[in-house]
Amino acid sequence: MANRKPLVIVDGQIQQIQSGDTLEAEVSAQQTISAENGEVGSIVIGTPVYISGAGQVKKAKADASGTKEVIGLVKDASISASETGTILVNGVLTATTGQWDVVTGATGGLTPNTVYFLDPSTAGKLTSTAPSTVGQYVVRIGIAISTTAMKVEPEETVLL
């Protein structure tokens, strides 16, 4: 395969990048927000959360309209009750296989190339099986890119 030089704009002109020049670009864009944990207990990394009040989040669950709108996954290792932490809204979330096991109920971390959904049975959990019961919501959260990383892109919900 031949090496190719990217095109750049210099002084309004399109040209090949010159030898010795480099490109500056963000490789891994992530969108995060800060929010207060509105739960009684801690919420851990990878937990899907919804906005429960002004600047506050709680564990999401796919069985009710009020808890299904996932804003993102907890990015911090843990956020204590009433404390503020970081929520990954969009991007790649990396956690240990053990940390993912807590959120998915599986063992060995995530399954690469598997889509994960919001669990309709347990608040704050993810499942690799889409809900199928009438009255539940299908909420696609993201896709595993390895046993320890997920591309997080919460999507619009579908009521069954």
Image (tube, helix red, strand yellow):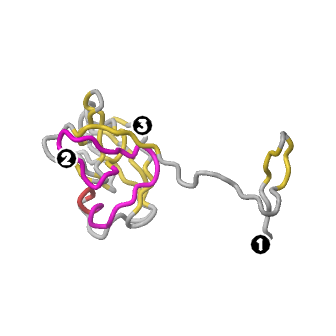
Q: Earlier in the sequence, mark 2 or mark 3?
A: 2
Q: Secondary structure at mark 3?
A: loop
Q: Residue furthest bottom?
A: 1
Q: Amino acid at mark 3?
A: Glu
Q: Residues within 10 Å of mark 1 (few under 14, many from 20)?
A: few
Are the residues tagged 1 and 3 within 8 Å (C-beta)?
A: no
Q: Which residues are magenta?
A: 75-100
Question: Which numbered disc, 1 or 3, marks the residue that appears first in the sequence?
Answer: 1
* Residue 67: image tag: none
Q: Residue furthest front?
A: 20
- What crowding class fits label 3: few (fewer than 14 Cα within 10 Å), some (14-19), or many (20 or more)? few
User: For residue 80, which numbered disc appears in the image?
Assistant: 2
**Depth order, front residue of 109/19:** 19
Task: Measuring from the top left, give residue 25's x and y in whole percent.
Answer: 63, 51
The span from disc 2 to disc 3 (Cα, nearest Å) is 28 Å
* Left or right: 27, with 11 as reference point: left
Residue 103 falls in image quadrant: bottom left
The answer for how far apart the CA atoms under marks 1 and 2 are is 52 Å
Q: Residue at x 37, y 37 (%)?
A: 158
Residue where numbered disc 3 is placed: 156
Q: Which mark is residue 1?
A: 1
